[in-house]
Image: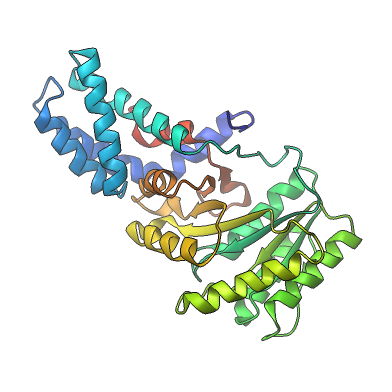
C-alpha cells in the first residue's frame, strides 16, 4: 500500500477547493445521467458513460469503469440510482489502485538514495519550473537539503524563473551561460550536489517536442552524463502535464513516453479548470504513477497524489 502520510484536514480542504470546478461539472453531468431513473439500467449506464467521457476521463478508462459498475450491479442484483455515486467512487478508486502499485513517498519520508536525482520534463507552459520550485520548497520544509539544476539552457526565461524560485525557497541553483550544453549543466549540478551533501537534486530540462529524435537524444545524453557522477541517476524522470488542457495532456504524455522513459507524472493547474477528470484517465492508461497534483498558486498547493482521496473529492456527493 502506498505511503501517503496522514491526509490532514488542511490537505483535504486544499484538494476540495482545487477540484471545485471539476466536481461541479462532473456531478452535474452525473445528475443529468440519472434524472427520472430509480434503478441502474442500460440507459443510465449509457448516460453515465457519456458524462465521464465528456468530463475528460477518456474513452478507454471510462469503458473500464462502466464495465466494473455493470459487474457490480449484476452481482448486487438491485442497485438504485441513489447508490450509483458511491459505487462509481469505489470502483474508480479500485481501478486506479490496481493499475498503480508503486509506492509514492511523502516529502518527509526517508529517501531511497542520496542524492536523490529527479529529472523533470514537459512542454513549455505546463508548469514545469513552477512545479520544481514547489517541490524544492516542500522537500526543504521536510528537512532535506535541495539543489536545482538549470538545464533548460535554450530559454533565458526558464533559467531566470528557476533562479527566482531558488531565491524564494532558499536553495542553490547551478546554471551556465545561455546556449550551454544541458548535459554539462546536469553534470556540474550533480558534482556540486555530491560535494555539498545534498539530499534532493531537481534538474529542469527544455520543453521542446517539435522533434522527438532531438529530444530523445538530448535527454539520453543528460542521463548518461549524470551517471558518470551518480551511477543510477536519474532516480525519477517526472513528466509535468497541464491538467487544464484536458485531452491534450494525454497527447503530451504519449509523445514524451515515446521519447524517454518516464517514471512518474505531475498534473498541474487543476484549480482553474473543470477538466480534473483527466487525472483519472492519465493515471489509468499510462500505468505510470501520478505522484503530484497542482491545486493552486501557493507553494503548499502541490500535493502528493492520493488516489482514494482524489476520487472521493471529485466524484462523491457531500
Q: Residue 179, located in which quarter of the rendered image?
A: bottom right
30 up-or-down from 173: above or below: above
Location of the C terminus (image quadrant): top left
Q: Is residue 32 visible?
A: no
Say which residue appears at 81% left-offset and 72% top-offset: 188
Say which residue appears at 61% left-offset and 70% top-offset: 219
Rendered location of residue 31, percent (x, y):
20, 33
Say which residue appears at 48% left-offset and 60% top-offset: 257
Q: Which residue of the protein is positioned furthest toward the top in this rendering?
A: 77
Judged left or right of residue 296, residue 58 is: left
Judged left or right of residue 141, residue 284 is: left
Judged left or right of residue 225, residue 213 is: left
Judged left or right of residue 161, residue 68 is: left
Rendered location of residue 18, percent (x, y):
45, 45
Rendered location of residue 37, percent (x, y):
10, 24
Say which residue appears at 24% left-offset and 24% top-offset: 71
Location of the N terminus (image quadrant): top right
Which colour assignment does the render follow? rainbow
144 up-or-down from 192: above or below: above
93 up-or-down from 49: above or below: above
Towards the viewer: 287 or 58? 287
Towards the viewer: 100 or 154? 100
Q: Residue 197, located in which quarter of the rendered image?
A: bottom right
Rendered location of residue 133, percent (x, y):
66, 59
Q: Residue 120, located in which quarter of the rendered image?
A: bottom right
Number of numbered callouts drawn: 0
Q: Is residue 34 visible?
A: yes
Amino acid at each position: 500500500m502506498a505511503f501517503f502520510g496522514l491526509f490532514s484536514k488542511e490537505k483535504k480542504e486544499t484538494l476540495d477547493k482545487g477540484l471545485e470546478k471539476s466536481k461541479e461539472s462532473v456531478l452535474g453531468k452525473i445528475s443529468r445521467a440519472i434524472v427520472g431513473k430509480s434503478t441502474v439500467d442500460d440507459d443510465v449506464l449509457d448516460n453515465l458513460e457519456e458524462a465521464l467521457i465528456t468530463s475528460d476521463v477518456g474513452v478507454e478508462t471510462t469503458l473500464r469503469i462502466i464495465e466494473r459498475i455493470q459487474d457490480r450491479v449484476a452481482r448486487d442484483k438491485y442497485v438504485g440510482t441513489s447508490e450509483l455515486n458511491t459505487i462509481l467512487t469505489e470502483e474508480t478508486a479500485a481501478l486506479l489502485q490496481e493499475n498503480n502499485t508503486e509506492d509514492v513517498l511523502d516529502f518527509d519520508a526517508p529517501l531511497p538514495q542520496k542524492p536523490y536525482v529527479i529529472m523533470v520534463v514537459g512542454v513549455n507552459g505546463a508548469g514545469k519550473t513552477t512545479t520544481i520550485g514547489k517541490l524544492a520548497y516542500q522537500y526543504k520544509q521536510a528537512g532535506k537539503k535541495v539543489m536545482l539544476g538549470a538545464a533548460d539552457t535554450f530559454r533565458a526565461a526558464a533559467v531566470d524563473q528557476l533562479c527566482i524560485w531558488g531565491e524564494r525557497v532558499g536553495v542553490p541553483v547551478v546554471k551556465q551561460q545561455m546556449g550551454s550544453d544541458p548535459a554539462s549543466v546536469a553534470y556540474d549540478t550533480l558534482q556540486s550536489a555530491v560535494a555539498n551533501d545534498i539530499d534532493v537534486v531537481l534538474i529542469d530540462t527544455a520543453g521542446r517536442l517539435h522533434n522527438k529524435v532531438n529530444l530523445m537524444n538530448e535527454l539520453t545524453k543528460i542521463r548518461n552524463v549524470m551517471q558518470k557522477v551518480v551511477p543510477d541517476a536519474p532516480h525519477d524522470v517526472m513528466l509535468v502535464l497541464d491538467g487544464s488542457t484536458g485531452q491534450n495532456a494525454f497527447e503530451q504524455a504519449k509523445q514524451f513516453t515515446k521519447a524517454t522513459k518516464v517514471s512518474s507524472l505531475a498534473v498541474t493547474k487543476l484549480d482553474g479548470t473543470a477538466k480534473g477528470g483527466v487525472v483519472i484517465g492519465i493515471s489509468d492508461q499510462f500505468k505510470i504513477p501520478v505522484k503530484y497534483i497542482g491545486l493552486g498558486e501557493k507553494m503548499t498547493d502541490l500535493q502528493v497524489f492520493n488516489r482514494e482521496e482524489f476520487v472521493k473529492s471529485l466524484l462523491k456527493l457531500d
